[in-house]
Amino acid sequence: MKAAIIHDLYRVAVGRMLRLALLGTFLSTCAIAPPASENSDWSRQRDQLQELDSWELRGRVNVRYDNESHTPRIIWLQQNVDYNIRLWGTFNAGATEIVGRPGFVTMENDGQTLSANSPEDLILEQLGYELPVSQLNYWIKGLPAPESEAQLVFNELNQLTTIQQADWTINLSDMRQYGALNLPRRVELTRPRNDIRLRFIGLNWTGGALTEQ
C-alpha cells in the first residue's frame, strides 16, 4: 500500500515537471519570435519596393465620393519623382492628364491646362473627388508613405495586406509575383470622412525589371 502511494506521488511529480518544461519551452519560443512588422520577409520586400522608383501600371479605378460613383481607366507612369497619370472613361468629357513632381503639378482637362502646388487640391477642384497622389505613389506598391507613422497588418505568409495611415485604410490583395517582388492587382483605399472609396482593380505592372511570373 505504501509503495503504491509513493509510486502515485512520483508519477504526479513527474507529470508536473513535464508540464512545466513544456510551458517554459512555449514561453521562450514566444519571447524570441519577432513581431510581424519586423520579420525578415517584410524587411526584404520593403527594401526592394523602395528601390522600385520607375514603373507603369494600367487598370481601372472605381471612385465613390459624396454618394457619386465613377470607374475611369487609369495609366500611371512613374519615373523617380516625376509622374504622369491619365484618366479617361465614365466621368468628365475626354481624357484627363496629370503631370507633376513634388511641389508642382499640371492638369490638362477639356482642352484647359491648369497648374497648382498640390495634385490633391487640383484634382478635387477640377474632377470633384480626392486622389491622394502624393501618398498613393507608395501605397499602391504596398509601402507606407514616409512622412507619417503607419499601422501595418500582415497575413500568415508575412505579406503586407493593410496599411492605416493619414486617416486612410489601404487594403492590398490579389498579389502577383514580378521577379522577387509581390505587387497587388487590387488596391482599395477608404476614409470615413466624405465616405470616400478608391478601388483600383485589374492592375497590370510593367517597367524596369518587372516581369510577371
Image (tube, rainbow, N blue to C red):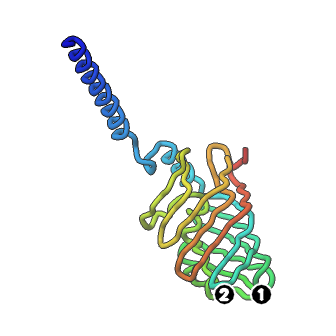
Asked whether residue 123 is in view, the answer is no
Q: Is residue 30 left or right of residue 98?
A: left
Label 2 CA crowd tier, 10 Å (few <14, some 14–19, many 20+): few
Secondary-structure class at tag 1: loop
The answer to which image quadrant residue 197 occupies is bottom right
Label 2: element kind:
helix
Q: Is residue 11 left or right of residue 47?
A: left
The mark that comes first in sequence, 1 or 2, is 1
Q: Residue at x 35, y 38 (%)?
A: 32
Counting every numbered tag in the picture gives 2
Residue 134, compared with residue 175, is above or below; it is below
What percent of the width, then of the height, locates residue 58?
Answer: 74, 63
Position of residue 145 measured from the top left corner of the image (x, y, whole percent): 50, 64
Residue 93, numbered label: none
Q: Quadrant of the N terminus?
A: top left
Q: Which mark is residue 126?
A: 2
Near-viewer residue (85 or 155): 155
| Dot 2 amino acid type | Gln
Q: Residue lying at the far front in this picture: please name it.
A: 1
Identified at 64% across, 68% down, the residue is 83
**How far across and how far down the image is residue 176, in percent?**
68, 50
Please state the horizontal and vertical placement of residue 167, each as a whole percent of the image.
Answer: 48, 73
- The residue depicted at 53 percent of the width and 77 percent of the height is 192
Nearer to the camera, 11 or 201: 11
Q: Which residue is mark 1?
A: 111
Q: Name the residue type under label 1.
A: Gly
Q: Is residue 90 left or right of residue 113?
A: right
Relative to 17, does residue 98 appear above or below in the rendering?
below
Q: Nearer the viewer, residue 91 or 171?
A: 171
